Image (cartoon, rainbow, N blue to C red):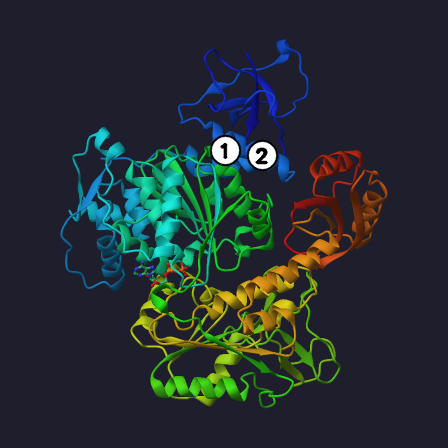
């Protein structure tokens, strides 16, 4: 029988093979390829075009003893490859990562946690504590324990030897149907009850309906979607929850455990290979009731899937830029369609695209109007930096400094937000004017004073901070320009030497354990002033935090891209939502040079609907997403002339088509990145024009030298 096989081999398209009698689409196979054997999946006929080959010449595949790739996942792979113009094999690798092919962990399958022993080791005590916190998941395989408690499987084996983790006598059947008894959730407000009721009904009815769960931070969205999760798993089903920056979601996990009494399986890039293997088994076998993951979790088979939640659905972290550039939010919605399950996009500041889907009636909106329990939204103040600037060489303007002082006096906490790692974003020579640039990228090197280095935030290039100007050789002439969080911390130490502060960035908080420590310190009142980036903007709930200062509210508006205001609104809105989550009211100060800008005014007056309406008009007038469609084509090469020439030739070869225009080539944002020179062509299509078919046809017409790389990004996030 002839069949199409998708091989897990970079650079190979779908190929035809002979499949043995009884083989079916979805079977994992091993296919001969030249002298080698390569794993792949037998695909559905007609999903992809293959080169016609004489049946007599076809070689035969062997079916591997592995769970087949289910139909909804095959449809998803086919759709992603087609929509994002990506190599199907690259998409398939997300479905069957390395861990899929490794043997399951050996030994007795299931373990329960016994009594905890005394220990002097801090690390061991920490691990035991984490295991204790997830005690309810037992009996479970070691891998599930490892994933839940963020421990290494090897360490857990030692605990098995020591008799702390005990083999459980569980039958196969037990495991399949056993679910922890779910404790009841909190009593819901009326609005929450209505929203939760709709979601529960959609889960119960297997409705392939996308929902926008919309409400300000603190409105109780999480509580609502956890009800839908409860519905999904109570009948033995599975739920998938996607979070941005999964490695740092300690606060979320604590809350989940408190609500359900067990820990979810985690899926993200930070897992150890053993934990990954275990998590893969637990998730794809249906054993894991709830999976919490980064966007990559979207591609894992879940036989009992009943619900998908995308929390903080507006977050840029759901967009993958490398390898297969896809948007996790949109892929989640498509997976919901293929699986026949509801998808919940929860956010206080939806993307304009999502709002438009609501307006068109494709997504159903569930709105929670107020903060839970009558907590007030924070009071927002704008500080006009042109009129009330900070003292020279400083970044905290007087009104913000005064507000921090009030918090210190009242023993309340403040958060100073600056989305810039390091000490200073630019190092300038006062003698010759040289700005120290990355040799590989169109970017300045950022000084990291603690590390005593200059670093590129794009390619990772770094060098020791020089004493003399690398260009003119002048000594002591290099000056840091502008603030990063390290510099802000220096100012805070100068202003309030007695205050207890912490700097939280991806340089200082690397693991969920670091984040857990930070969260505990803040909760215990060990911190007066938090200084941090993006990382602090999300998900945390600190009742004693009553002040948020956004040190540079204009930062997101630079660059003049059409999505800049939306992004700034989302980011500032989110960080502002950290203030006043408890009984005490919160205040937010935005430092800006553009107090009249629409986004600042909207934040000031809490005028979200007006802001969206105005942004919508701008996009509509320009025919930009969601009122038109875009694909970015980036042509790059190590050699600048080769890149420019290829981009020009590609531009000239663009065919004419109704409703489609090609703009450029122009230097790409980051004209140089990781040593490659980059030019960008932007394809603009009307909403109904066949963008993908156009680009596929066009790129197929042009032969470019192998030194030139062409990367396609459908629905680019910047335009
Ligand atoms: P959001 O996800 O919209 O930001 P949360 O679900 O985190 O809001 O709710 C904000 C706070 O209010 C949390 O501390 C949460 O535990 C609490 N909360 C929300 N709904 C309820 C409820 N029905 N009963 C008790 N506490 C609630
Ligand atoms: Zn660089």
Q: Is residue 611 left or right of residue 472?
A: left
Q: Residue beneath label 2, please?
A: 79
Indicate the position of residue 532 as horizontal and vertical percent values: 47, 71
Q: Quadrant of residue 274?
A: top left
Q: Is mark 1 within 8 Å of ligand 1?
A: no
Indicate the position of residue 306 as horizontal and vertical percent values: 39, 38
Q: Quadrant of the C terminus?
A: bottom right
Secondary structure under tag 2 reads helix
Q: Nearer the viewer, residue 344 or 194?
A: 194
Q: Quadrant of residue 289?
A: top left
Find residue 338 and name its label: 1
Task: Name the residue located 18 percent from the left edge and 61 percent from the top edge.
Answer: 119
Against 620, residue 530 (above or below) is below
- Is residue 446 visible in the rendered image? The answer is no
1 and 2 marks in contact (CB < 8 Å) = yes
Spatial separation of the CA atoms under disc 1 and disc 2: 10 Å
Indicate the position of residue 602 as horizontal and vertical percent values: 58, 69
Secondary structure under tag 1 reads helix
Taking the view exactly as shown, the residue that stands out farthest to the top is 56
Against 640, residue 289 (above or below) is above
Q: Quadrant of residue 368?
A: bottom left
């Amino acid at each position: 029988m002839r069949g199409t096989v998708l091989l897990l081999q970079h650079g190979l398209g779908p190929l035809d093979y002979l499949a043995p009698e009884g083989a079916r689409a979805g079977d994992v196979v091993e296919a001969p390829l030249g002298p080698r054997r390569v794993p792949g999946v037998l695909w559905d006929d007609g999903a992809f075009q293959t080169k016609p080959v004489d049946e007599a010449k076809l070689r035969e595949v062997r079916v591997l003893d592995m769970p087949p790739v289910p139909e909804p996942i095959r449809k998803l792979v086919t759709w992603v490859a087609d929509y994002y113009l990506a190599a199907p094999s690259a998409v398939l690798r997300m479905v069957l990562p390395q861990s899929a092919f490794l043997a399951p962990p050996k030994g007795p399958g299931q373990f329960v946690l016994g009594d905890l022993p005394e220990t002097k080791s801090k690390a061991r005590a920490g691990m035991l504590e984490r295991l204790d916190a997830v005690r309810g998941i037992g009996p479970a395989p070691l891998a599930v324990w490892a994933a839940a408690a963020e421990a290494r499987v090897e360490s857990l084996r030692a605990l098995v030897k020591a008799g702390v983790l005990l083999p459980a006598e569980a039958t196969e059947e037990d495991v399949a149907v056993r679910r922890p008894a779910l404790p009841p959730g909190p009593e819901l407000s009326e609005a929450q009850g209505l929203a939760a009721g709709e979601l529960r009904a959609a889960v119960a009815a297997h409705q392939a309906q996308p929902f926008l769960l919309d409400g300000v931070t603190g409105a109780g969205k999480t509580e609502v979607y956890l009800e839908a999760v409860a519905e999904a798993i109570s009948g033995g089903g599975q739920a998938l929850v996607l979070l941005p920056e999964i490695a740092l979601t300690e606060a979320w996990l604590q809350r989940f455990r408190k609500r359900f009494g067990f820990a979810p399986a985690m899926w993200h890039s930070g897992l150890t290979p053993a934990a990954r293997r275990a998590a893969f088994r637990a998730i794809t076998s249906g054993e894991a009731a709830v999976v919490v993951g980064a966007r990559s979790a979207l591609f894992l088979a879940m036989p009992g899937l009943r619900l998908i939640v995308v929390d903080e659905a507006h977050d840029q972290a759901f967009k993958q830029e490398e390898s297969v550039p896809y948007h996790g939010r949109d892929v989640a919605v498509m997976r919901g369609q293929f699986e026949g399950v509801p998808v919940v996009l929860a956010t206080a500041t939806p993307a304009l695209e999502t709002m438009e889907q609501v307006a068109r009636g494709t997504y159903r909106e569930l709105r929670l109007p107020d903060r839970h329990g009558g907590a007030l939204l924070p009071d927002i103040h704008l500080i006009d930096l042109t009129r009330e600037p900070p003292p020279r060489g400083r970044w905290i303007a007087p009104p913000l400094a005064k507000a921090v002082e009030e918090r210190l006096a009242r023993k309340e906490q403040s958060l100073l937000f600056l989305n810039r790692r390091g000490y200073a974003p630019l190092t300038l020579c006062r003698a010759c004017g040289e700005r120290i640039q990355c040799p590989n990228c169109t970017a300045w090197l950022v000084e990291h004073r603690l590390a005593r280095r200059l670093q590129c935030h794009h390619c990772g290039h770094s060098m020791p901070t020089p004493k003399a100007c690398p260009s003119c050789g002048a000594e002591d002439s290099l000056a840091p320009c502008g603030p990063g969080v390290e510099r802000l911390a220096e100012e805070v130490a100068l202003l309030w030497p007695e205050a207890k502060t912490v700097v939280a960035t991806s340089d200082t908080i690397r693991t969920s354990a670091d984040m857990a420590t930070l969260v505990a310190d803040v909760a215990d009142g060990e911190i007066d002033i938090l200084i941090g980036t993006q990382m602090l903007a999300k998900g945390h709930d600190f009742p004693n935090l009553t002040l948020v200062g956004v040190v540079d509210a204009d930062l997101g508006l630079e660059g003049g891209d059409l999505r800049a205001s939306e992004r700034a609104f989302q980011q500032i809105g989110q960080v502002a939502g950290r203030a006043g989550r408890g009984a005490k009211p919160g205040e937010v100060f935005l430092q800006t040079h553009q107090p009249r800008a629409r986004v600042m005014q909207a934040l000031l007056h809490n005028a979200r609907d007006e802001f969206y309406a105005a942004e919508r008009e701008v996009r509509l007038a320009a025919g930009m997403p969601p009122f038109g469609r875009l694909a970015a084509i980036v042509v790059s090469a190590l050699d600048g002339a080769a890149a420019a020439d290829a981009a020009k030739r590609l531009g000239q070869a663009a065919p004419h088509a109704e409703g489609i225009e090609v703009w450029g080539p122009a230097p790409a944002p980051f004209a140089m990145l990781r040593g490659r020179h980059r030019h960008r062509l932007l394809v603009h299509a009307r909403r109904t024009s066949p963008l993908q078919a156009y680009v596929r046809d066009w790129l197929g017409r042009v032969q470019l030298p192998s030194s030139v790389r062409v990367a396609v990004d459908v629905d680019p996030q910047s335009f």
